[in-house]
Amino acid sequence: MTATQDLPLSGLVVLDMSQFLSGPYATLRLQDLGARVIKIERPGAGDLSRTLYLSDTEIGGDSTIFHAINRGKESLAVNLKDERDIARLKQLIKRADVLVQNFRPGVIERLGLDYEAVRAINPRIVYGSISGYGEDGPWVKRPGQDLLAQARSGVMWLNGDDGDGPVPFGLAIGDMFAGADLAQGILAGLVRRGVTGEGCHVQTSLLEALVDFQFEVLTTYLNDGRRMPKRSGFRSAHAYLSAPYGVYEAKDGFIAIAMTPIPRLRELMGLEALDPYCDDPASWFTKRDEIKRLVAGAIAERSVGEWLAVFEPADVWCSPVLDWDDLMESEGFAMLDMLQTVEREDDVTIRTTRSPIRVNGERPKIARAAPRVGEHTDAIFAEFGL
């Protein structure tokens, strides 16, 4: 196991003034690479995501989502309306390497902790900001929330079947991608600082992250006369890809089939009904619903295992569709060792994920659970002489 002090960001101090998901996800990634993350929270209530429940599960007084995205961090309770606390925080900023915030545009300026103010305190700091839709324009004061950002980004029209209307992703993809993008920018800023000695301001937004997420299909749209994508009306999985691309129901489950030439599929499945399409590649897109219905009818007659026995030896790109129980029981997932149990001194334990990044062949492990509000305030003030 890689020791924390051996990780690439070991020795760096990150002040996390963000809450909910996007900013904390960025700092989680930095922490997993060895940085020390000090979470700045309101005394008493703390990060609002402490009470953002995905279910009725609560651990140690906080939501599971808070634990998942804040594991291993320290909590410093600071009243941003108290001059003495602000003065202490500014002293801490002098010693920090990174600061992350995701307040609504205008709020951080009113607090006197915007980039220019912080840069004056510490010119070497790499300052990261996440907003909903940027810092200017007509949407700047709109709520920067994931579902609403998805709604404005166009991404909902890529999900579901044609005629379904917009279908949102079942995950907070705007938050996660914005956090990942910010983490990349911060790492680049740290590299630049190593060369020039100067910090920088890294910015992104939920909307920018979601637009970038769609770069492949947006590039097609922009260079194809701006024709809107048309989703398949049956078993749609990608608006721009032809049959058989999709998920099909077998006797005992579901199987996903990716890019496969129709003649090859006809041969392996013994499906004579595909003959009219074999010599007409254009029809694999224009007639994809008809082709998919024929494939679906045949798939339904046999089990997933039977079809895998046909497809996999022939190098057809396919996979069984696993649910979480299936995933957890699979040898392939077990080999990755992506789960861990984190603990806290008040007997809080939670089963959660580990970093998706390996360093020198090892996956870092942070065994400490998410902190209580202000759990480390006294220790941090004492350490930094505040």
Image (cartoon, helix red, strand yellow):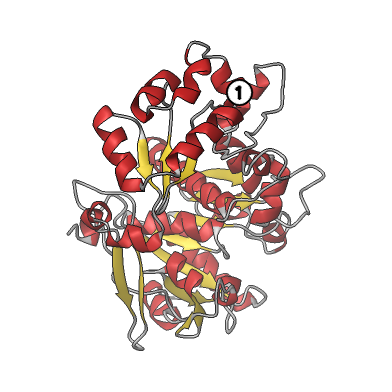
Question: SS of the residue at dot 1?
Answer: loop
Q: In which quarter of the view is residue 335 placed?
A: bottom left
* Residue drawn 22% across the image and 55% down it: 331
Q: Is residue 178 left or right of residue 320?
A: right
* Residue drawn 63% across the image and 38% down it: 158
Q: In which quarter of the view is residue 216 placed?
A: top right
- Please state the horizontal and vertical placement of residue 60, each as a whole percent of the image: 45, 85
Looking at the rendered structure, the kind of residue marked 1 is Lys
Q: Nearer the viewer, residue 115 or 205?
A: 205
Q: Nearer the viewer, residue 276 or 93?
A: 276
- Please state the horizontal and vertical placement of residue 165, each as a whole percent of the image: 73, 45
- Residue 1 to residue 75: above or below: above
- Please state the horizontal and vertical placement of residue 232, each as a whole percent of the image: 62, 33
* Residue drawn 22% across the image and 59% down it: 5
Q: Which residue is mark 1?
A: 287
- Please state the horizontal and vertical placement of residue 332, each as a whole percent of the image: 25, 51
Q: Callout 1 environment at 10 Å: few (<14), some (14 to 19), or many (20+)?
A: some
- Residue 235 to residue 148: above or below: above
- Residue 350 to residue 282: above or below: below
Marker count (numbered): 1
Residue 354 in view of the camera: no
The outermost residue toward the right is 138
* Residue drawn 24% across the image and 48% down it: 359
Q: Nearer the viewer, residue 336 or 273?
A: 273
Residue 292 in view of the camera: yes
Q: Is residue 340 left or right of residue 39?
A: left
The outermost residue toward the bottom is 346
**Which quadrant of the figure contains the N terminus?**
bottom left
